[in-house]
Image: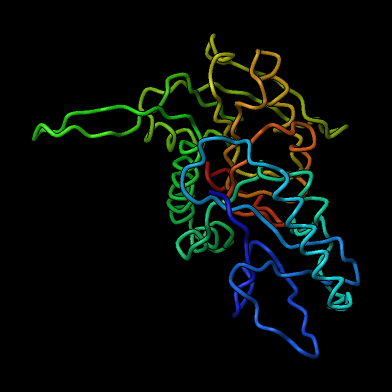
Amino acid sequence: MATELRCPDSMPCHNQQVNCASTQNPEPQQPDELIPDHAGGNSDSAAKLTLLRGRVRSSSVPAERDLQACGDATLNSESNGGTGNSDAPASDSLLGDCELSRQIGAQLKLLPMNDQIRELQTIIRDKTASRGDFMFSADRLIRLVVEEGLNQLPYKECMVTTPTGYKYEGVKFEKGNCGVSIMRSGEAMEQGLRDCCRSIRIGKILIQSDEETQRAKVYYAKFPPDIYRRKVLLMYPILSTGNTVIEAVKVLIEHGVQPSVIILLSLFSTPHGAKSIIQEFPEITILTTEVHPVAPTHFGQKYFGTD
């Protein structure tokens, strides 16, 4: 069940910079209220992100909820006179803008934040971290993302018999899934997927940017022959501009894969990268741990020891 990201009483979540403006007659926020954004008198923005809570069996979450939430926050902002902190971040920097929420909606999913994930993110971003600590933390974070990615795949109910003869109603994966890694940094996520799915098939795409035009170009692609029948876990740890992923999805589409069955597994994303991908392919699902204007682009080099 998706829920909205709130502004805690003590300090805002690190994934979202929320300016909770002070008023002359401040009223305590209720637990289920949205925090209005009074950035520079612009009443069109509402701080909102989607978090994962439990298994989501369907990716089609009604967009009306997002639009309604944005509208409610706008009304709250207008009722308070539209005054606030003029130093609030730009709407494209932290996914706090209503327009960005309309464009991305429930397709962008964030792992629920906790101290463990925050520590792993900190070690990965720390330039003084040793390569051993970096790889250990990266592998742990990858495993968490992969586990949640598998949680987005379809299940079906089944009945099993326990050693004591008890009938237990459970679930099991539906067949027809595969992974695709975008070389080279995406290969760092392959082992995490194999640790969870021992016999899963994994395809590869090699995409590099042209030094003169800076446009992404596909050099190699190899997939399971029946990939058009499968749900695809597309692995790429860092979303910066989104251009590489966009080209990879285009290649998958050429092989018969529909964007609606693609789940992009990523560790870090910029607002621009996530926005670009969703604008190009509105049906794709993006799963990540953090959306931040500055992505750790050194990830691939440090993970493979070529930094």
Residue in view at x 43 percent, y 50 percent:
140
Q: Is residue 268 left or right of residue 26?
A: left
Q: Which is more toward the observer, 61 or 281?
A: 61
Q: Looking at the image, can residue 50 be seen?
A: yes
Q: Which is more toward the observer, 72 or 299?
A: 72
* Residue 61, quarter of the rendered image: top right
Residue in view at x 61 percent, y 54 percent:
290
Query: Relative to 195, does residue 203 appear above or below in the rendering?
Result: above
Rendered location of residue 214, percent (x, y)? 83, 35
Q: Which is more toward the observer, 131 or 6?
A: 6
Residue in view at x 79 percent, y 50 percent:
100
Q: Residue furthest top?
A: 225
Residue in view at x 69 percent, y 27 percent:
207
Q: Residue furthest bottom?
A: 24
Query: Relative to 189, does residue 228 appear above or below in the rendering?
Result: above
Q: Which is more toward the observer, 307 or 35?
A: 35
Q: Looking at the image, can residue 293 be seen?
A: no
Q: Is residue 213 left or right of residue 159?
A: right
Rendered location of residue 179, percent (x, y)? 51, 26
* Residue 103, quarter of the rendered image: top right
Q: Is residue 152 left or right of residue 285?
A: left
Rendered location of residue 56, percent (x, y)? 51, 41
Rendered location of residue 164, percent (x, y)? 8, 35
Colour option used? rainbow
Total marks in image: 0
Q: Residue furthest right?
A: 41
* Residue 77, quarter of the rendered image: bottom right
